[in-house]
Image (tube, helix red, strand yellow):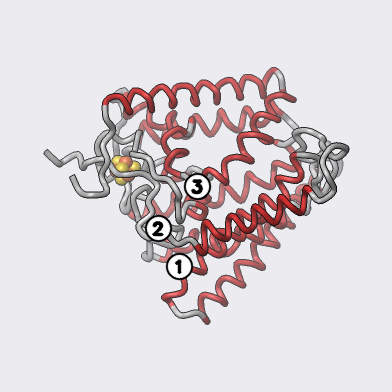
């Protein structure tokens, strides 16, 4: 066993299995609520689970990888022995990585016109993703098709999870079959540009690292639309702000990459990751308590009459400082998402 490996003890395995089952059932309950109690479902999914996720990806992406309900759905075929387990070629991995980034950029703006306001539509989105995740698990080996393939959250995991504070053992792979190379869970200080060739694998990473801060900023400049009053016009607004922001910061990133020496690129990538997640909480945390740019949008509970006027700026300064520290300045070498299991070929 190499020094990074940390195998689960039987007791830990049972503990993780129980946690995985509980989180999977919570996921099922949220889908049920989205269908039949949409107000509760929307709050549970868009205003509790999703706002917590980016911070978890910064602090401990390995925990998310161990318990994500969609990830578990995609691994059902492997766990029950009916996955065909096809190996992905490098070219197909590049196609899947690009698809993941494109799905992310396609789905997130639709929140303003559909998903933030419509529980059943969000449930159908989640069920469709669960179906695709399952099929990926049926055909492709391990996590290569979904978790490390076309999952639209995976690019964000790579951007935010560059310097985790905590790395649990891998509770999904009992033995490593090298389903993806390199495995994103055990590359020290991995990021979306860790894979340097070919260009088809590098480009989606560059687009995400450079463009995501602007995309997040642009997304918060658009109001939730109660109805598609003039369909195409509102769709254009929902997409133009995030994609315009993406273009601006992507160009800035490309210029900085050209002028900075290569040794500073990891710092630059961490800085852009910190900018994206800080920008998210800059708007999102105050909005949860009624201080959003558009009153009522993304609000969990209205605390504007209770909390002091300095609450939003205090949140913004604290979260921005924390993420700059965690991602940029507190550089922890050799940080990994999960401790890898032994290889399947090991004795
Ligand atoms: S640990 Fe091995 S089997 Fe598991 S996701 Fe990574 S490469 Fe695939």
Quarter of the rendered image showing ligand 1? top left
Quadrant of image for the N terminus: top left
What percent of the width, then of the height, locates residue 66?
41, 35
Tell me if residue 170 comes above or below residue 323 in the rendering: above
In the picture of the structure, the residue carrying the numbered disc 2 is 189
Quarter of the image for residue 276 reads bottom right
Looking at the rendered image, the disc whose residue lies closer to the viewer, 3 or 2, is 3
At a point 42% along the width and 32% down the height, the residue shown is 74
Determine the CA span between mark 3 and mark 2: 13 Å
Determine the CA span between mark 3 and mark 1: 18 Å
Quarter of the image for residue 324 reads bottom right
Label 2 vs 1, first from the N-terminus? 2
Question: Is residue 179 visible in the rendered structure shown here?
Answer: no
Q: Is residue 22 left or right of residue 211?
A: left
Looking at the rendered image, the disc whose residue lies closer to the viewer, 3 or 1, is 3
Quadrant of image for the C terminus: top left
Q: Is residue 62 left or right of residue 180?
A: right
Which label number is shown at residue 59?
3
Label 3 vs 1, first from the N-terminus? 3
What percent of the width, then of the height, locates residue 16?
38, 28
Label 3 vs 2, first from the N-terminus? 3
In the picture of the structure, the residue carrying the numbered disc 1 is 266
Binning the other alpha carbons within 10 Å of mark 3 as few (below 14), some (14 to 19) or many (20 upward) gives many
Q: Dot 3 lies on which element?
A: helix
At a point 44% along the width and 22% down the height, the residue shown is 21
Binning the other alpha carbons within 10 Å of mark 2 as few (below 14), some (14 to 19) or many (20 upward) gives many
């Amino acid at each position: 066993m190499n020094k990074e490996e940390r195998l689960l003890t039987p007791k830990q395995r049972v503990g993780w299995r129980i946690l995985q089952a509980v989180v999977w059932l919570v996921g099922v309950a949220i889908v049920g609520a989205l269908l039949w109690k949409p107000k509760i479902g929307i709050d549970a999914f868009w205003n509790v689970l999703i706002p917590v996720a980016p911070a978890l990806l910064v602090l401990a992406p390995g925990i998310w990888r161990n318990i994500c309900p969609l990830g578990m759905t995609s691994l059902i075929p492997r766990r029950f022995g009916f996955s065909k387990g096809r190996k992905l070629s490098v070219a197909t991995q590049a196609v899947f990585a690009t698809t993941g980034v494109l799905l992310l950029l396609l789905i997130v703006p639709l929140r303003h016109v559909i998903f933030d306001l419509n529980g059943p539509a969000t449930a159908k989105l989640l069920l469709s993703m669960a179906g695709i995740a399952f099929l990926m698990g049926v055909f492709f080996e391990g996590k290569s098709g979904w978790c490390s393939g076309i999952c639209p959250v995976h690019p964000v995991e790579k951007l935010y999870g560059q310097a985790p504070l905590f790395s649990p053992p891998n509770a999904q792979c009992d033995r490593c079959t090298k389903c993806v190379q390199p495995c994103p869970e055990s590359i020290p200080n991995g990021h979306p540009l860790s894979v340097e060739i070919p260009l088809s694998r590098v480009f989606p990473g560059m687009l995400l690292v450079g463009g995501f801060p602007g995309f997040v900023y642009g997304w918060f400049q658009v109001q939730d639309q109660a109805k598609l009053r003039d369909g195409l016009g509102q769709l254009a607004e929902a997409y133009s702000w995030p994609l315009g922001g993406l273009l601006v910061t992507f160009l800035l990133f490309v210029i900085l990459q050209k002028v900075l020496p290569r040794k500073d690129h990891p710092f630059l990538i961490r800085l852009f990751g910190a900018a994206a997640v800080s920008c998210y909480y800059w708007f999102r945390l105050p909005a949860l308590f009624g201080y959003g740019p558009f009153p009522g949008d993304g609000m969990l509970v209205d605390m504007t009459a209770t909390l002091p006027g300095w609450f939003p700026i205090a949140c913004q300064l604290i979260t921005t400082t924390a993420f700059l520290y965690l991602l940029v300045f507190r550089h922890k070498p050799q940080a990994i998402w999960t401790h890898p299991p032994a290889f399947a070929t090991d004795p």
